[in-house]
Amino acid sequence: MRPQILFPLFAEVSTLKGVGPRVLPLVQKVAGPLVRDLLFLSPSGVIVRRPAEAASAIDGEVGVFTVTIDRLFTPSRPGAPLKVRASDPTGFVHLVWFGGSPQHIDRLLPRGETRLVAGKVERFNGEVQIVHPDIVTLEKAADIPASEPVYPATQGLSSRQLRKLVQGALPAAPDLPEWQDPAWLKKQNWLGWRAALDALHAPTAEMDLSPDAPARQRLAYDEFLAHQLALARRRRAREIRPAPVIVPGAASEHLLQALPFQLTNAQAQAVAEIRRDLASGQQTGRLLQGDVGSGKTAVAAVALADAASSGFQSALMAPTEILARQHYKKLGPMLDAAGVAAVLLTGRDTPAQRREKLAALASGHVQVAIGTHALFQDAVRFDRLALAVIDEQHRFGVNERQRLQAKGDPRLGAVHLLTMSATPIPRTLELTQYGELEVSRLMEKPPGRTPVTTAVLPLARIGEVAARLKTAVESGAQAYWICPLVEESEAIDLAAAVDRADDLRRLLGVEVGLAHGQMPGAEREAVMAAFADGRLPVLVATTVVEVGVDVPNASIMVIEHADRFGLAQLHQLRGRVGRGAKASSCILLYGGQDGALGETAKERLETLRRTEDGFEIAEEDFRLRGGGDPLGLKQSGFPAYRFADPIRHRSLMLAAADDARLIMNRDPDLTSERGRAVQVLEELFDWKNHKVGAS
């Protein structure tokens, strides 16, 4: 039940004065449906006004002038501006409007009368000009606000209208019990929650809009704490759910003996962590995070064999058919050597194949199912499903993951979950996306991986690169050629890729494959399969394609306009080569024909040239990008925060994660005085109804 003290904040925004049928959908679009949403709408700017005189007014500042109206100049031609000349004792102040009624302006500013005028100062021919003054009034200067927050307006709803609505909503915000630790609050020198909300909506300078402003830090920490508590609750709920006990056995030992290599120390540690979880009798929830080529598949294979050794079934789900087939191709022989039967289940099976595979799973004759979304369809039945492994888990929604886990038999207990990600992420962002999961990191690569030589070249040398590619292809090499987004149009982007493929066909004299997002899935996968089988020496692809197929013979990666890519994306693309015994290279082409490259872009490409460590690259990407949408947060299932910024507020996120763990350990049922206040915080942000954590 939501605490009664929060009822005014969770009232519909339509209950506010001034929010009628016309305004309601506009407020909902900008802020949301609730009074709380309107109060959580942070100002995007601030107008700071200062008393000014014509002689000393500063260009670019917003001045408040006391002027006498001298003359109205009506437009001499259509489209010309309407001008009013006014003056104070020190000089002229010219007021300008583009559009508007001369009669209205004449009534507003009658000749010979004194008015207060406020607006942004522009110097034109040495005199003050104000275009579209934001205030014209008879009031005293003291009555004009010295500062005014600016809100993100929308068509039909101005910033000033939003400000009036926010000011009307603020009295509905109650004084809430303090949920923050008193010692922490004192150390940070922060205001209480209600005072911080008032300060948010009353900025007096640009610094008050900064993520580092005390009021914004306080609200960001509250939001982090509410989110981390939701993740901690999910983790606790999982940890108390009984699940099948899975322990190593004969199949596991046979699989380890059949591997053509020794596990790295990082792989062995990850196996030990996963085994400890699976043997605990409580539901496992673990993320296996590893760089490109770090050996996640081998670790997953051990877990699959452990489940089979303990008499259970498992499922491995990948986001695309080509990745599912790749897993089956790699894992099938390993599992077969261990005496574990596996099937590949995709949407392309014939009805007869599908019936046979479904029957084998339902009867328990097959211990491992590898596939795509087809695994959680209604027709799929397992006999004793105990472990679900999700590859590239960020490509699946929470509901899809849960649908696969729901295939287990409740009498056996909850299905264990092991997710895998090949995108290295800084630890701070792990807390945001995967906070309810335990994390195992594979920080080293198995021996035998060929280092990739990375070259950074201006685009002007593209002809030289193509000539070298021709020599390499003639000697049996395979290459990827990645075309970036050239225009804000997918059609133009596609045309550029088609042209590049045609150019390379003419120059190289060989067949060049083309893969892009507008192709039917089956056609695109056929092209990529032909490349994987060695039938195509060169594959041109746009960035909308998941170039995740494992082609050990591919040893060259060319990326056009590499300066337009994120570091993490470049690193993932580079990881497509160096997977076999051949010496491999990655050529990053940057800039236009003039070869110009900004300092930040130069630093990013230099980082990629210097290191192949995905975690180091992720940290550098994290540092260089700063604000905005780092690492593609919105595309990667990260939560949409109102106040918090995982980049700027990373130290606050870490502190909130520690605080949430402390609260749940000391007072898991939240019955103490602080616990009851924390319940109010949880309801205020309502994270339990969000897709918190990995999605």
Image (cartoon, rainbow, N blue to C red):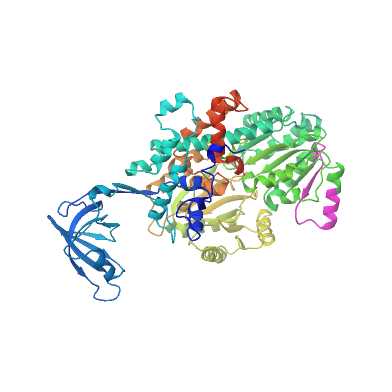
Question: Residue 585 location in percent, x, y?
Answer: 54, 48
Question: Residue 355 location in percent, x, y?
Answer: 85, 53
Snapshot quadrant of residue 157: bottom left
Q: Is residue 694 left or right of residue 78?
A: right
Question: Looking at this view, is 93 or 13 the one in front?
Answer: 13
Q: Is residue 151 visible?
A: no
Q: Is residue 286 visible?
A: yes
Question: Residue 552 location in percent, x, y?
Answer: 64, 47
Numbered disc total? 0
The structure residue drawn at horizontal position 70% and vertical position 40%, both measured from the top left corner, is 389
The structure residue drawn at horizontal position 53% and vertical position 53%, both measured from the top left corner, is 558
The span picked out in magenta is 336-358
Residue 365: say if magenta. Answer: no
Q: Quadrant of the N terminus?
A: top right
Question: Looking at this view, is 587 or 368 the one in front?
Answer: 368
Question: Residue 4 location in percent, x, y?
Answer: 56, 38
Residue 337: say if magenta. Answer: yes
Question: Looking at this view, is 55 or 7 the one in front?
Answer: 7
Question: Looking at this view, is 108 or 276 the one in front?
Answer: 108
Q: Is residue 472 left or right of residue 649?
A: right
The structure residue drawn at horizontal position 59% and vertical position 45%, both measured from the top left corner, is 578
Give the residue furthest to the left.
Answer: 89
Q: Quadrant of the C terminus?
A: top right
